[in-house]
Image (spheres, grey):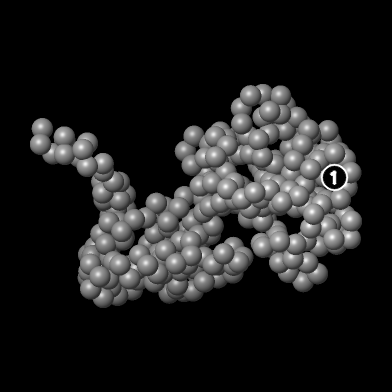
Amino acid sequence: MRSFRIVIAGHGTLPAALLATAELICGQIPDLAAVGLEPTETPDHYADGLRAAIGHDHRPVLVLCDLLGGTPFNMASAIARRSPRVVCIAGANLAMVVEAALAAGTLDDALVERLIEVGRGGIVETERHRARRVS
Amino acid sequence: MGLRLVRIDDRLIHGQVVAGWLRTLGAQRIVIVDDATASDEFLREVLTLAAPQGVPVEVCGVADGAARLISLAGTPEPVIVLARMPRTVLALRHAGVPIEVVDLGGMGAGPGRRRLHKTISISPDELRELRELEQMGTRVEIQIVSDDRPIPFRSLDSSN
């Protein structure tokens, strides 16, 4: 059983769509929230929503952000810098969300490394990928 | 021309800047000029984290920012300059920074602020400051993302 909560943070409807799509793959995912930044929303208002989703108990939280340098990431990384129980990763994709959702155990360094590896590892171009697979 | 984009945006670095402008302009450096941010170590660090690898972020106050920008304007290195409010750009202009165009990229709504266009709202003080910039020969344009056609501020300033 996963001991930490997951929050998907991103622009517009992407977080909700990532959540819904991950559930198509994994079935219902507990302790997973999506917080989308609306075009007219202020960064401070968005940060309030993010803090509510992160929760005020002492559980560790993994925040998966869609874009390095975007407002969702900027707000999440500011929260993470002040709160050691919050870990923030940018560049989230579906493979990473699924891996995190299905992870068992604790939010430790090994898991963070694995999530980054899975996110990167799922990015291939078919011809280059084939050449490596068959050689 | 070193200063490829001088942008007023109260979010400073965010998605439109890193995913849009940085790529379109091929900028290799971001200079933020804002006294409040320059004196807050935590904010400075968060903004430094917001830029992609290989793109240094400098955060200056208005006084040291002007000197830094005058020197960067003379180099071929493409630079994006971000400020949170018109007053800062006006101060830079008064200090001799060569600014041909200033882009209004994000100015949030709020009490006492009039909506000019989409996500651009201004206060009466800011209106005066933008008019002064135009009088000094700096063109003021609204261009939220690099793909937008720039809209001259003058065409929206109805009392002109």
- Most foreground residue, A102 or B102: B102
**Residue underneath mark 1:** B134
Amino acid, disc 1? Glu
The C terminus of chain B: image quadrant: bottom right
- Compared across the picture, whether B14 is left or right of B121 comes to left
Q: Is A31 located above or below residue A18 in the figure?
A: below
Mark 1 surroundings: few (<14), some (14-19) or many (≥20) residues within 10 A: some
Q: Position of residue B143 (x, y in %)?
A: 66, 50
Give the residue drawn at x 78%, y 67%.
Answer: B114
- Most foreground residue, A36 or A3: A36
- Compared across the picture, whether B138 is left or right of B120 comes to right
Give the residue drawn at x 49%, y 34%.
Answer: B54
- Compared across the picture, whether B104 is left or right of A88 comes to right
Q: Quadrant of residue B125?
A: bottom right
Q: Is A35 located above or below residue B58 in the figure?
A: below
Q: Position of residue B88 (x, y in %)?
A: 78, 47
Helix, strand or loop status at disc 1? helix
Q: Chain of mark 1?
A: B
